[in-house]
Image (cartoon, helix red, strand yellow):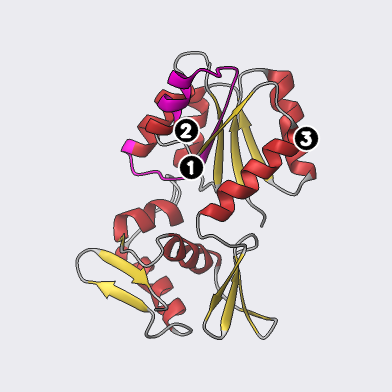
Amino acid sequence: MGVKILLLEDDKLFNETLQDFLEEEGFVLDTVLDPYSALDLTYENNYDLYLFDVNLPYENGFKLLEKLRDAGDMTPTIFITSRDDKLSLTQGFTKGGDDYIVKPIDPDELLLRINAVLRRQIRSDVVQLGEYRFDISSKTLLKEKKVVELTKKASELLLVLLEAQGKVVSSEQIKERLWSYTEEASDGALRVYITQLKKYFPTQITNIRGIGYRISFT
């Protein structure tokens, strides 16, 4: 599955235009017109990127992201807005935004910014992990160009650990990323996916008792 994006833009025509463009580029899109619908979808799905308009009905995009960050959702976020003043720029980054693009938007520039933000999470499209390689876009583990069989959640878990760049990721943070709001997460299930990864990375994945896990290749 490709990179999954949640697009929040209240201009219906512009929303549809962006959706068509990004889907043609290979992204998977969910689109909404208001922040409440966006919030509901973040509970039900795991996304690789948020694209949030700022001027919205009910509450602005800054406030929505602030809620998500407070809840532990660290999904990369790009704000799309007509605001170009320094105060708005500062507010966007203060609330946890990763980038900011001003309307009218050049689609090619947006594509460049999306790819830059996604790469920035772990600095590369493909990560070398000893004798293995992990393709970030497809979330596929490879050994000598052959695909290593991993479940979808084990692949997502590997990505989460790599994004932390050697830091400990709490079990709660991992469960929030791997399971949607409608799914039942458990420590037991998490341990199953950790065990899957340890088949390939037995010494690199460490259990920090009572806290979570980390992966390190240093």
Give neighbour class at mark 1: few <14, some 14-19, many 20+ (Cα, 10 Å).
Answer: few
Earlier in the chain: of badge 3 and badge 1, it is 3
As measured in the structure, the alpha-carbon distance from the residue carrying label 2 to the one carrying label 3 is 23 Å
Q: Is residue 86 above or below residue 143?
A: above
Q: How far, Cα to Cα, is label 1 from label 2?
A: 7 Å
- Total residue callouts: 3
Assess whether residue 78 is covered by the magenta stretch.
yes
Which is in the foreground here, disc 2 or disc 3? Answer: 3
Is residue 6 found inside the magenta-colored segment of the image?
no
What quarter of the picture does the N terminus occupy? bottom right
Type of amino acid at the residue the image marks with label 3:
Asp
Label 3: few (<14), some or many (≥20) within 10 Å? Answer: few
Q: Earlier in the sequence, mark 2 or mark 3?
A: 3
Magenta region, residue range:
70-92
Q: Residue under circle 2? A: 40
State the mark number for residue 30: none
Secondary structure of residue under mark 3: helix
| Image quadrant assignment for residue 206 | bottom left
> How far separated are the C-alphas under marks 3 and 1?
23 Å
Q: What residue type is labelled 2?
A: Asp
Marks 2 and 1: in contact by CB < 8 Å? yes
**Element type where label 1 sits in the image:** helix
Front residue of 119/37: it is: 119
Up-down relation of residue 161 to residue 34 (above or below):
below
Question: Is 189 situated left or right of 53 in this image?
Answer: left
x then y, percent, for residue 127: 56, 70
Vertical order, 161 against 194 (above or below): above
Name the residue beneath numbered marker 3. Answer: 20
Callout 2: SS:
helix
Horizontal arrangement in the rendering, residue 82 relative to residue 208 (left or right): right
Q: Name the residue under label 1.
A: 44
